[in-house]
Image: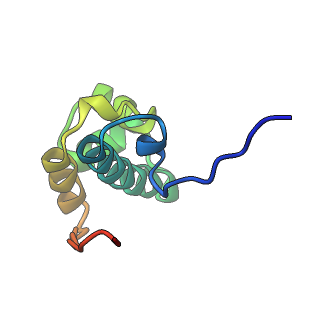
Amino acid sequence: MAKVIKSSGNVFEDLGFDASEAENLKLRAQLMRELESLIHDQRLTQSEAAELLGIHQSRVSDLVRGKIDRFSIDMLVKLLAKTGRQVEITVKRQAA
């Protein structure tokens, strides 16, 4: 029987990334998921999404395929802004 370990709440930390990199990856994943959901919900083709976002279709492909290493937080925030979305970041202390 496999041993089950409770998640920390950040899959990237659970996978062994250091805390700062895990937070960065978690935030990028959330932003990418929001963009992918928008593309899916509006039933946009990759070409239509590329036009909306002002990027090449190949970058949309990277986005919907989850290629997280190809997008910075800054780039994802800019792409969301082009869709009329506003990104808010909350900073809080970790529980002791």
> Quadrant of the image for the N terminus?
top right
Compared to residue 71, the image places residue 34 above or below, namely below
Answer with the quarter of the image where residue 66 lies.
top left
Answer with the quarter of the image where residue 2 lies.
top right
Horizontal arrangement in the rendering, residue 51 relative to residue 11 (left or right)? left
Report the front residue among 31 and 59: 31
* Coordinates of residue 50 in the picture (x, y in percent): 28, 40
Report the residue that reaches farthest toward the right: 1
Report the residue that reaches farthest toward the top: 58
Compared to residue 56, the image places residue 94 above or below, namely below
| Residue located at (43% from left, 49% from top) | 36
Color theme of the render: rainbow
* Coordinates of residue 18 in the picture (x, y in percent): 30, 39
Instruction: Report the number of numbered marks.
Output: 0
* Coordinates of residue 81 in the picture (x, y in percent): 18, 61
| Residue located at (44% from left, 52% from top) | 10
| Residue located at (50% from left, 51% from top) | 40
| Residue located at (23% from left, 46% from top) | 20
Compared to residue 13, the image places residue 8 above or below, namely below
Horizontal arrangement in the rendering, residue 2 relative to residue 31 (left or right)? right
Report the front residue among 42 and 11: 11
Compared to residue 78, the image places residue 59 above or below, namely above
> Quadrant of the image for the C terminus?
bottom left
Report the front residue among 58 and 90: 90
* Coordinates of residue 16 in the picture (x, y in percent): 42, 34
Report the residue that reaches farthest toward the front: 96
